[in-house]
Image (tube, grey):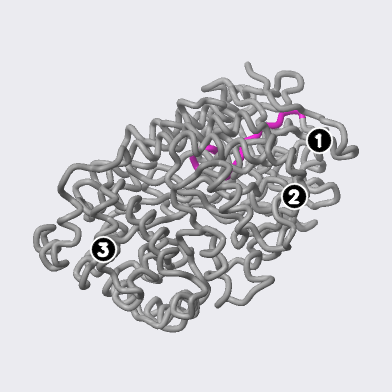
Amino acid sequence: MPSRRTVLAATAGVTAALATGTPAQAGGHDDKKLRSLISRMTLQEKVGQLFVSRVYGHSATAPDQADIDANLKEIGVRTAAELVAKYRVGGIIYFTWAHNTRDPHQIADLSNGIQRASLTQPRGLPVLVSTDQEHGIVCRVGEPATLFPGAMAVGAGGSREDARALGRIAGRELKALGIGQNYSPVADVNVNPANPVIGVRSFGSDPRAVSALVAAEVAGYQGARVAATAKHFPGHGDTAVDSHYGFPVITHSRELWERLDAAPFRAAIRAGIDSIMTAHIQFPALDDSGDPATLSHPILTGILREELGYDGVVVTDSLGMEGVRTKYGDDRVPVLALKAGVDQLLNPPSLDVAWKAVLKAVQDGELTEERLDASVLRVLRLKAKLRLFEAPYVSQAGVTRTVGVRAHLAAADRIAERTTTLLVNEGRLLPLDRREHPKVLVVGADPASPSGTTGPPTGVLAAALTELGFTATALSTGTAPSAATIARAVAAAREADAVVVGTYNVSAAGAQKTLVEQVAATGTPVVAVAIRNPYDVAHLPSVPAYLAAYSWTDVELRAAARVIAGRVAPRGKLPVPVQRADDPARVLYPVGHGLTY
C-alpha cells in the first residue's frame, strides 16, 4: 500500500490542504478549504461525488471472474478500481451478495484498495464506504465480527446505555474495516403488525421510546467516527407494502405524523445525526402530488431542511427499489431526487444512465451547478468530519485488535440477555430443569441466516441447550411443514421430555400452527420461541410457555436458551402491542408486558 504521503503528493496536494489548518466550524471541517476544493473540480467529478454505487467483488483490483462479469453487465467496468476511475463516485456500498464482505481482513483490504484507486486519480478524493449494518435481521458484515440484537430486541431491553454501547462497539468495528457510513438506526415507529419491510427492524411502536434509543445509538456510532443514518424519512412504520417491490402509501394525517413518525427523526437531528435516508413512500398529508418522498421537494426541503432545520447529508434509499421507479424512468429519478433536496444517490439500477442524466440536467440548465455544489459540500464536510482526508486507510493490525474481540462479543451477549421477553409461563414451566426435562427436542422454522451467523436456528438452539446441560436434538420443520414433517416431529416429541419450537410469522391457518398444536397434543411440555415477530403468540394460545427473541441470529437465540435453562432471568418488555388473533381491535399483551422469574 502506498504511504499516505505518497498518495497525497499524487493528488496535487488537494487532500493535504484539507488535512492541515484550523477548522473553521465546530464540525471539524473548514468550509473555505472545501469550497476551494470544489471550485477546482470538474463538473463530471462533482456529479460523481453524489453517487454511492454497488460493485461486485472481494478485491478492488482482482475480483473473481464471476464478479468481473457481473460488473461488466451491470456497471460497464471490470473492478471497483475501474468504477472509481470512470465515474469518480463519492461512495461505494458493501453487500454480502456482491461478495464484498467475506471476512474482516478482506474487507479492510477492499476498503484500502478503493481508497488507493480514488486517491491516485487527478484531484482524487477519499471514498465514503457505506453498508447496512442494522444488526438483527439486516447485516452485511457477519461473523467473526460482533453481531448484536436487532432494534426491536433492543427496544425490549429498553436501555439507552445498551443502544449507545451497541453503536459504539459496532462503530469501532466498522471503522476498523474502512466503513465510514452505516445505514442505521431505523427511526421508523412500527405501528402496523403486518408491516412486511420494517417490523423487528424498528425499536417499537412508542415514538418516545424509539426516539430515545435512536438518539443513543446515533451517539454511539458517531462517537466511534462512523456516520449514523436515520431511516426512512418521513416514516415507514405503518405500511403493509414492501417498497422494494411496490409503492406504499402512508395515510397518516399531518397531526399524526408530527406525533408519531416525526419524533425519532427530530431526536436524531438533536443528537447531531450525520445522514438521513429517504423513504420510497407516498405520504399524501405531507405532499399530495403522488410522488415518493425521495422525490418530494415539499417533504425533503420544505419539512426536513426548513421545518426540522436539518443541514446534514440526505441519502436516498436504494434507487433500484420499485417504490421509487413506479412513476418515473431511471433517468429522471436521480435528477428529481436532487431537485427535491437529496445529496447522495444510492445504488441506481444503471449507474451510467443515472450519472449521465444528472450531467445532462446540469448542462441543459435543469439543475444548476450551484445546486450540485451545495450537495458536494455536504458530502465533503462529512468526509472531513470522519477524517477521511487525513486517514483514508485502515490497518490489518487494527482489524485484529478490534473486530470480534472477546470483550465485544461478551458485551453483545450481555445486551441480548436483557432483551429476551417471556410472554407466557403457565404452571411455571420455565425455567426448564435439566434433571426433570433432560431430553429436549428443538423443532421449528429455519429461515436462512440473516446476517452471516452460523444457523440454522434449530441447530443453534439445540447446541446452546446442550452446552447448558440438556441433551438436545434439532429437527428442522420449516416455515410451512408438510403433513409428513409434522408426523415426524410428533413422533420425536413423544420421545422427548420437552419440546422447544421456533415460530416464524405464524398465521391463523398455517402449517406452523398445526405443527405446534399437534406436538402439544402429545402431552410433552412445549416452549415456543418467536424468532422474528412477537405477534406469533396470538395464534398459539395453547402453548404454556412463549418467549420472544425478535430475531434468529445466534446472539439472540443463545440468550433465549440461557433464559429457558434459567441461567438468566427474562428481562425484556414488549416494545409493541400484540393484538388478539380473533379480534385485532383488542390488545392481548400491551406494550411493557413481560414476565420474569
Neighbours of disc 3 within 10 Å: few (<14), some (14-19), many (20+): many
Nearest the viewer among 4 and 135 is 4
Nearest the viewer among 259 and 408 is 259
For image coordinates 46% across by 47% down, the residue present is: 311
Above or below — where is 343 with respect to 539? below
Mark 3 → mark 2, Cα distance in angstroms: 41 Å
Q: How many marks?
A: 3
Query: Which residue is under mark 3?
Result: 125
Query: Which residue is under mark 1?
Result: 579
Mark 2 → mark 1, Cα distance in angstroms: 27 Å
Above or below — where is 39 with respect to 207? below
Q: Where is residue 140, by image quadrant? A: bottom left
Label whose residue precedes the other's in the sequence (2 or 1)? 2
The disc at residue 285 is 2
Magenta region includes residue 395:
no
Q: Where is residue 105, by image quadrant? A: bottom left
Q: Which residues are magenta?
A: 544-557
What is the three-letter code of the residue carrying label 3? Leu
What is the three-letter code of the residue carrying label 1? Gln
Magenta region includes residue 555:
yes
